[in-house]
Image (tube, coloured by chain):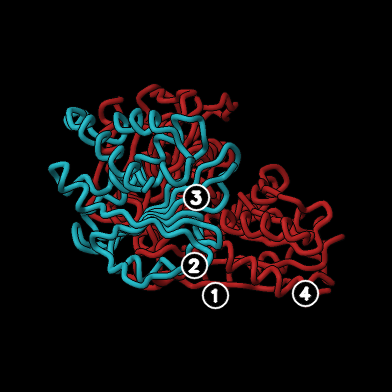
Amino acid sequence: MRYDVFFAGYGGQGVLLAGNLLSYAAIHEGKNVSFFPAYGVEKRGGSAMCTIVFADGDTGSPVVGNPSVSVLLNQLSFDKYAAKVKQGGICIVNSSLVDCQNITLPGVEIVLVPMNQIALDLGDVRMVNMVACGAYIEKSGALQRASLEAALKKALPERNHRLIPANVNAMEAGAQAARG
Amino acid sequence: MQTGSPEKIFVKGNEAVAMAALEAGCHCYFGYPITPQSDIPEYLSRELPRLGGEFIQAESEIGAINMLLGASAAGVRAMTSSSGPGISLKQEGISYMAGSELPGVIVDVMRAGPGLGGIDASQADYFQATRGGGHGGYRIIVLAPASVQEMYDLTMLAFDLSDIYRMPAMVLADSVIGQMKESVTCGPRPETVLPPKNWVVRGRAAGEPQNVVKSLYLGDGEMEAFHWKMQARYQELADRECRWEEVHTADAELIVTAFGSTSRIAKTAVAMAREAGMKVGLMRPITLFPFPKKAYAALSERCKLFLDVELSTGQMIDDVRLSVARDADVAFYGRPPGAGSLPTPEELFEQIKKNYRAAA
């Protein structure tokens, strides 16, 4: 089985960390992984995106034109990338920042998750990427929740390990919101 | 300096190069920062001194390549790395190393050019790398990794081939392979039999005759003899060291050919074509010098249509055309570097369909 997912947002939303986290989780499950980042020269505020491909065998192209699942965290990335989601695929949208009135993507399942609001309710908007990861694993079924917990230990520097329970909560909240 | 481990780790292509250098016993690194390869000096500045090696951030790329020449003349394994603009600056030193028959590993993580260009993925330094970018008529070994795993494996191989054939070896990567992260296994240094370095500069202290490392050949017929000796060595390299990967070529009616990151995208496009019932294969050269000419010639005995894909307006295509049979056609699809110019597998699949239909 080969899975691909595209994450995009603005710099500072934790798009690359989310991609790293999913990569570590896939490695934890014995998969081969490619993580292809692209980001602006700005530290914050520019655009940030990454494509993660994981498979039992060869991961093939690190670049994906029509992703099976896209997780779009702001208006700009929604406008630019929503139409590229593959037919039969899933588009997970951060409805806190994307204008969701009258959006239609024929042949694509749209999942609206108010990611910023959920993260704020949990105490810190910076957990928006964890909410997004939770929504992704819930809708894709591609990775086990336990693998993401294990991945947090690898993706986060040691000094931040005390924050792991809060991040796990945020993922859980994201999954729940995606379940609807 | 052992870093090899059987466990799968998750690292950037550039980091894999640095890790392989340590495992290969690279004792000295000289470099100057430039995107998109700065992770290599960053990693080695941290790890190499701890393992007893020397890391020097040179005053310039020209300084770095001449330090590489010096370290190599003294007999140690050494490496430098840069990207297009810096590699151009190094060409004089690379020519002197080639003229002095000195080994040494040069990593080029290509970016867009000419001039200062930009940091997008590019494969436009193919000519510079494979034709010997400096003056005087020489070639260097050029290896083209297509994955983070190969960044590790081919860096290791570059050290061995460079020592065996006494010429500089280049790892020609691009910003996609350098910046992306993949799961890799960092294996131990292979047990390769290497020739003794009985030519190193060692002084006369031990009472041994003096060795001279130089690229100045003024004696009667000396320069010509050097050129024919090197020509024979390039031939030996071509006979023994060509490496390539073929996918679904046995019954292919169209063979896509690409190197480095582009070949990864092409491989998925080929899989899409196969799923659609089209007989399409992939030929990926791993050594760009020596170029696997015989392998292309053999493939073109049966398959008469090739599609060359590059992140440039077409450079490797010259070698493909020189290698295939006269009655084989070579089509081209190029994306010169620029923001968003990286082709997708879907885009290459369209090109496959277009050429496949035209042939049928």
Q: Is residue B83 visible?
A: yes
Chain of residue at mark 4: B
Other residues around mark 3 within 10 Å, as few (<14) / some (14–19) / many (≥20): many
Q: Tell me what hue chain A is rendered in.
A: cyan
In this rendered view, identify the residue nearer to me: A66 or B237: A66
Q: Residue furthest left?
A: A123
Where is residue B268 shown, x and y percent of the image?
A: 61, 55
Q: Residue furthest front?
A: A180
In this rendered view, identify the residue nearer to me: A68 or B251: A68
The disc label shown at residue B35, or none: none
Q: Quadrant of the N terminus of chain A?
A: top right
Q: Quadrant of residue A101?
A: bottom left
Chain that the image shows in red: B
Task: Give the CA distance from mark 1 to mark 3.
Answer: 30 Å
Callouts 2 and 4 in the same chain: yes
Residue linked to disc 2: B124
The amino acid type found where label 4 is placed reads: Arg
* B21 shown above or below A73: above
Residue linked to disc 1: B313
Other residues around mark 1 within 10 Å, as few (<14) / some (14–19) / many (≥20): some
Q: Residue at x 42, y 32 (%)?
A: B9
